[in-house]
Image (cartoon, grey):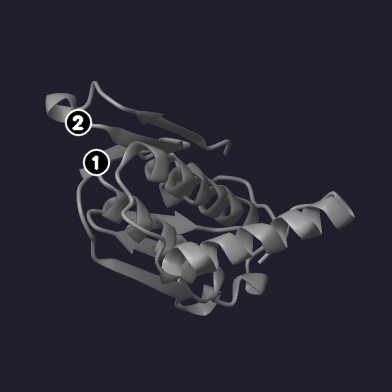
Amino acid sequence: QIPRVRAEIDGGTKDSPYVQVQIGSTLVYAYDLAAVRTFARAWADAASRPVHLLPEDSPCQPATGCLTAVSVTVRGEQRQRVLFVAAQASPDGRTHLLVTVGPLTVAVYDRAALDSYIGAWTLAVDYARRVFVDPEPDAFDEIAERERQRELRHFERTGQLLHR
């Protein structure tokens, strides 16, 4: 799934700026920096789970909900939760991650999908910093920047994306 991230300075609700992230049939409109950062933190948390147990790539199976389309609008900090579900505990027998942020829950069945979400929300934070007023860098910004630099060095050395 190829992610699409864009930012608009006006044209949103009451002409508010927003960042839009679309991955597959999931579309999120975030109307402030806190909302974007919440999603980025949740996906960073997902990357810290035992993702090496997920397959590199897997075919999308409609019976598991891959065709469900959803659009959400968020403002401010959102509740977030990340669960690693082992195959033996999964209703469909497949190991996966469940990432919940605010009203949205996404099931991720492979590392390629996980990388798509992580990359999209990392880019969204970069866009959000330009669109929304960011008073000063915080600890999250510093961690995200170190991770971006590490991934860039790995890519420059190997020509491959870093797999978590």
- The disc placed on residue 54 is none
In this view, which residue lies farthest toward the front?
136
- Whether residue 122 is situated above or below residue 146 in the rendered picture: above
Q: Nearer the viewer, residue 130 or 99?
A: 130
Amino acid at the residue labelled 2: Ser
Q: Nearer the viewer, residue 35 or 91?
A: 35
Answer few, some or many: residues within 10 Å of disc 2's Cα (few below 14, many 20 plus, some between 14 and 19). few
Residue 91 percent across, percent down from the top left: 42, 67
Assign the N terminus to one quadrant of the image: top right
The residue positioned 47% from the left and 36% from the top of the image is: 24
Count of numbered circles in the view = 2
In this view, which residue lies farthest toward the left?
14
Compared across the picture, whether 159 is left or right of 4 comes to right
Q: Earlier in the sequence, mark 1 or mark 2?
A: 2
Q: Which residue is mark 1?
A: 31
The reply to whether the C-beta atoms of the residues labelled 1 and 2 are less than 8 Å apart is yes
The residue positioned 25% from the left and 23% from the top of the image is: 10
In this view, which residue lies farthest toward the top?
11
Compared across the picture, whether 125 is left or right of 155 comes to left
Answer few, some or many: residues within 10 Å of disc 1's Cα (few below 14, many 20 plus, some between 14 and 19). many
SS for dot 2: loop
Compared across the picture, whether 104 is left or right of 67 comes to left
Q: Nearer the viewer, residue 84 or 49?
A: 49
- Whether residue 34 is situated above or below residue 142 in the rendered picture: above
SS for dot 1: loop
Cα distance in 3D space between marks 1 and 2? 7 Å
Residue 58 percent across, percent down from the top left: 64, 52
- The disc placed on residue 16 is 2
Amino acid at the residue labelled 1: Tyr
Residue 66 percent across, percent down from the top left: 45, 44
